[in-house]
Amino acid sequence: MTAPLSVKEQLAIPRVKMAELDPELRRAGFAEVNRGLRLEEALREAQRCIQCKSRPCVQGCPVEVAIPEFIGALAENDLPGAAAILRRDNALPAVCGRVCPQESQCEAQCVRGIKGEAVAIGYLERFVADWALEHGERSPVDANSSSAGRAVAVVGCGPAGLTAAGELARKGHQVTIFEALHDTGGVLRYGIPEFRLPKTIIDAEVAELQALGVRIECNVIVGKTLTLEQLRAEYDAVFVANGAGLPMMLDIPGENFKGVYSANEYLTRVNLMGAGRDSAATTPIVIGRHVAVIGGGNTAMDCVRTARRLGAERAMIIYRRSEAEMPARLEEIKHAKEEGVEFLMLTAPLAIGEDGKGWVASLRCQRMELGAPDASGRCRPVAVAGAFFDLPVDVVINAIGTRANPLLTASAPELGLTRWGNILSDEQGATNLTGVYAGGDIVRGGATVILAMGDGKRAAAAIDDYLASP
Amino acid sequence: MFEILENEILAPQLHRLVVRAPRVAAARQAGQFVIVRAAAGEERIPLTIGDADPVAGTITLFVQAVGYSTGRIVAIPAGGALRDVAGPLGVPTHIGQWGRVACVGGGVGTAVLYPLAKALAAAGNEVVTLIGGRAAPYIILRDELAVFSQELVITTEDGSLGRQGFVTAPLAEMIADPARRPGAVFAVGPVPMMKAVAALTRPAGIETVVSLNPVMIDGTGMCGGCRVVVDGEAKFACVDGPEFDGHRVDFDTLSDRLATYREMEAAHRCRLAGKEAA
Ligand SMILES: Cc1cc2nc3c(=O)[nH]c(=O)nc-3n(C[C@H](O)[C@H](O)[C@H](O)COP(=O)(O)OP(=O)(O)OC[C@H]3O[C@@H](n4cnc5c(N)ncnc54)[C@H](O)[C@@H]3O)c2cc1C
Ligand SMILES: Cc1cc2nc3c(=O)[nH]c(=O)nc-3n(C[C@H](O)[C@H](O)[C@H](O)COP(=O)(O)OP(=O)(O)OC[C@H]3O[C@@H](n4cnc5c(N)ncnc54)[C@H](O)[C@@H]3O)c2cc1C
Ligand code: SF4
Ligand code: SF4
Ligand code: FES
Ligand SMILES: [Mg+2]
């Protein structure tokens, strides 16, 4: 063990840089770009944390991970200890360490960021979580639950559902997850590509849940195969986490030409079905040479980087505001640029053109400029009069967002909804129906993995209380 | 896994499968479909639920092996299993009382038509069934449809069975004859057939329901790939359909979008042929 460092020495350590796959090599496949830290790197980065008494970083994390504590354990090379602390607050740390927008959450609050660079909390979280997965560290089962042994149904196998299921199983309940698709993970599997989140991580997390006794039934569409009413009759409580999965249309001319995809369709074909990247896959996809992706969020970055990997010579982001307003994680934007993605900022799509045979041939664009800030504080883009141009493209991907999927809620008319079709629930996830809880994107609209998990965790606690009450 | 209990060849390339899927069998209504995957790694394929026995926990699928994935599905013998069967999906058929109803089926569309026609007859409608195909061997479910059809008209393109020509000819005669004029028409088959039927019934003002077959993946409204244009608006056939008012459907956009993967599909068919040859 090395001697403890002085604060001055701690402050002198520069922020670790994560090794990344060479941009040239990335185009050849879907290998993970971020390669992870080595033990020495992680130990050194952990020493940059000055263990603030006020723990501002914790306030920045939606599930209040005990950040100084897990980093403290790591700094002492106590990996099992660090893993146990992490697991208490975060059911899927290997996922969050990779996909959380740390720069606007935990790391944004880190005091080390005031005068320099924040502690790389996400990297450290990933490091500890990967170590735990590799070393088969199992999460403890909480035998203290007062209401053990009740049956709970979870709808949806995304991060919210997985988290709630894990929490409830640890409290001794018999949990069954019903998933509409043929595989687990929700957006983690069909949306986020392997170069950001390897599927083996989802598989490992799912296997751990199964080891805890959670049953997962795929191919069950609640609202169609089984109704919410049936689940309420057969189970003591229900947690609904069916996500936000209804793509919004662009509503511009040409949207039905061959080669126009929603981000969900494009990513599902590639990630869930293996189209374009697995030679054994039988699901087809149109491979574009010039691909335009409309939108500026994580989904848009995932699409454009996927298109590049499938062989696009030009892969372009079309975004109506400027780069500063893009909601995507900074790291995705950086990686996309390294991979040769072009960013057409202050550009809005007007119409899609065809080649005379119904295939996409061009995208007519409108130049924009930033006007006064709107209600959200972001500058509103306004069209520059007469400034149009045509972009030659053969695939257009719409990544402007999703809304609540009405498949389940339409079949349960008594369930309270917002005017946008999202399920209404209180802080604990309770809906207007007794014993029915909800969380994740179906409640929040498109949000983040960690917010969905936080909902799953809070709802699990509330469900456990509900089941304990006489 | 969903066990295949029966796999019977009804016509060239057309199989009738009985599959154990108790939850689907219990929930299913006429007009709904399932998404099937033969095995891990395979495509997700939409197939209409032709019939169901909730007591036995089985559903019947009529599958025409037109390409790689349907070929893989029908190649599984009784005793084997499908990896995934998800459903029932789509909005059930609205079974109204129209008095006389013409049910028009073309090719494998006849299989999709069968549960609708059966449900319409069970609801007290007088069902006249018109089915067409390329030649005699492609005419399917004749006897099954005859059980509840007031009248059964068959047309073949080569005249090898029934009348020579397309189903639209006897339908036009029905519409023209006040004594036989249907109160509603249900049409399921190739897009050009449904388009022709809608063109016939539109001037006559006869309510016409068509069942659309765009390319699907999830079947739950998540991907938007199955969008069809109805009344100038995008509708997702898997959740808003698959049945729509035939007078409002943009059939040309549908046929164009159905051609998206044609070249790739041809390549897959070669691969299947290769596997069989091996
Ligand atoms: C491409 C993409 C990239 C993203 N990148 C990031 C990122 O980098 N960082 C981040 O924090 N967030 C990211 N997000 C957002 C994040 O993935 C979501 O907020 C999160 O997955 C929501 O979790 P959930 O459990 O509520 O729903 P989902 O992950 O959507 O899971 C819902 C599950 O329910 C299933 N389901 C739906 N209807 C039914 C039904 N009727 N019956 C049974 N099952 C049903 C679905 O098939 C799905 O498996 C991204 C989203 C997308 C689309
Ligand atoms: C709601 C619905 C119900 C259907 N019911 C039946 C049925 O009961 N029996 C039956 O035999 N067929 C049915 N079909 C059609 C069937 O899904 C297609 O024939 C099948 O998907 C073709 O796949 P393939 O790989 O064998 O052929 P391919 O050679 O890949 O494709 C042949 C043609 O089938 C269509 N097609 C391809 N992939 C899909 C897909 N994923 N979804 C829909 N269409 C596709 C395209 O027009 C394509 O050109 C139905 C389709 C829909 C949408
Ligand atoms: S869960 Fe996300 S926000 Fe919270 S500490 Fe981990 S990386 Fe940061
Ligand atoms: S704010 Fe930064 S330095 Fe302070 S405890 Fe949190 S991670 Fe460590
Ligand atoms: S098949 Fe994906 S939305 Fe209909
Ligand atoms: Mg196919």
Image (tube, coloured by chain):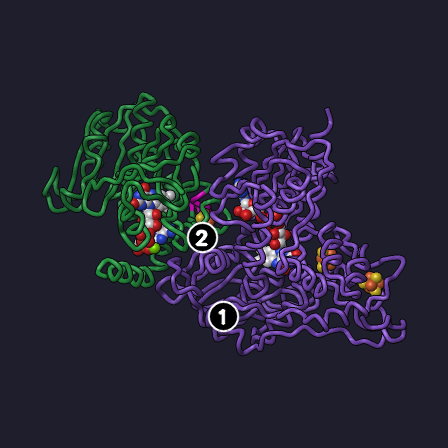
The total number of labels drawn is 2
* Amino acid, disc 1: Gly
Quadrant in which the C terminus of chain A appears = top right
> Judging from the image, what is the letter of the chain drawn in green?
B
Image position of A105 with respect to B74: above or below: below
Q: Position of residue A220 (x, y in %)?
A: 49, 40
- Chain for disc number 1: A
Whether ligand 5 has any atom under 8 Å from the Cβ at mark 2 is answered as yes
> Can you tell which quarter of the image residue B155 is in?
top left
Q: In terms of secondary structure, where does tag 1 sit? A: loop
Of residues A280 and B79, the one drawn nearer to the viewer in this rendering: B79
Of residues A281 and B202, the one drawn nearer to the viewer in this rendering: A281
**Disc nearest the viewer among 1 and 2:** 1
Q: Are marks 1 and 2 in contact (CB under 8 Å)?
A: no
> Can you tell which quarter of the image residue B5 is in?
top left
Same chain for labels 1 and 2? Say yes or no.
Answer: no
> Judging from the image, what is the letter of the chain drawn in purple?
A
Q: Is residue B235 magenta?
A: yes
Relative placement, left or right, of B168 versus A75 is left
**Furthest residue toward top:** B124
* Residue picked out by circle 1: A29
Instruction: Identify the residue at image location x=51%, y=74%.
Output: A27
The residues colored magenta run B230-238
Q: Position of residue B42 (x, y in %)?
A: 38, 54
Image position of A20 with respect to A230: above or below: below
Instruction: Identify the residue at image location x=29%, y=39%.
Output: B17
Circle on res. B225:
2
Q: Position of residue A25 (x, y in %)?
A: 53, 76
Q: Is residue A355 magenta?
A: no
Q: Residues within 10 Å of mark 2 (few under 14, many from 20)?
A: many
Instruction: Identify the residue at image location x=60%, y=49%.
Output: A208
